[in-house]
Image: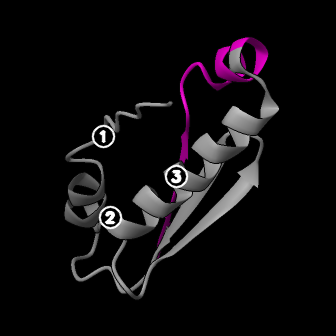
């Protein structure tokens, strides 16, 4: 099992400039996209503000780095807000 933290870069700027409603929509979309990347046995959780943690279950190799590398292989997630 492994836990990897992640956060949304510049999220405070989005909340401050576009408002909390847009920020909330972004958090919802981010959580959906993180969940899509996770395997069915993994858990994605919002920890605080713009911070998420991914609990990676059943790591198939001793150090499990391939699972984390696979999760972050497309690290940048772009959002286009209306």
At label 3, counting other C-alpha atoms closer than 10 Å, the crowd grade (few under 14, some 14-19, many 20 or more) is few
Question: Which colour style is shown?
Answer: one colour
Q: Are marks 1 and 2 in contact (CB under 8 Å)?
A: no
The structure residue drawn at horizontal position 59% and vertical position 41%, both measured from the top left corner, is 26
Q: Are marks 3 and 1 in contact (CB under 8 Å)?
A: no
Q: Which residue is mark 3?
A: 29
The structure residue drawn at horizontal position 35% and vertical position 33%, both measured from the top left corner, is 78
**Could you say which is closer to the camera, residue 65 or residue 43?**
43
Q: Which residue is mark 2?
A: 37
**Residue 20 against residue 67 in the figure, above or below:** above
**Residue 82 against residue 51 in the figure, above or below:** above
For discs 3 and 1, the disc positioned in front in the rendered view:
3
At label 2, counting other C-alpha atoms closer than 10 Å, the crowd grade (few under 14, some 14-19, many 20 or more) is some
Q: Position of residue 28 (x, y in %)?
A: 61, 54
Q: Look at the image and say whether residue 14 sits in the magenta stretch.
A: yes
Q: Which residues are magenta?
A: 1-17
At label 1, counting other C-alpha atoms closer than 10 Å, the crowd grade (few under 14, some 14-19, many 20 or more) is few
């Amino acid at each position: 099992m492994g836990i990897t933290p992640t956060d949304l870069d510049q999220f405070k700027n989005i909340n401050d400039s576009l408002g909390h409603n847009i920020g909330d929509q972004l958090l919802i979309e981010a959580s959906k996209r993180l969940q899509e990347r996770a395997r069915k046995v993994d858990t994605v959780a919002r920890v605080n503000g713009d911070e998420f943690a991914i609990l990676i279950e059943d790591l198939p190799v001793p150090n499990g780095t391939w699972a984390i590398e696979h999760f972050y292989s497309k690290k940048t997630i772009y959002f286009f807000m209306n």
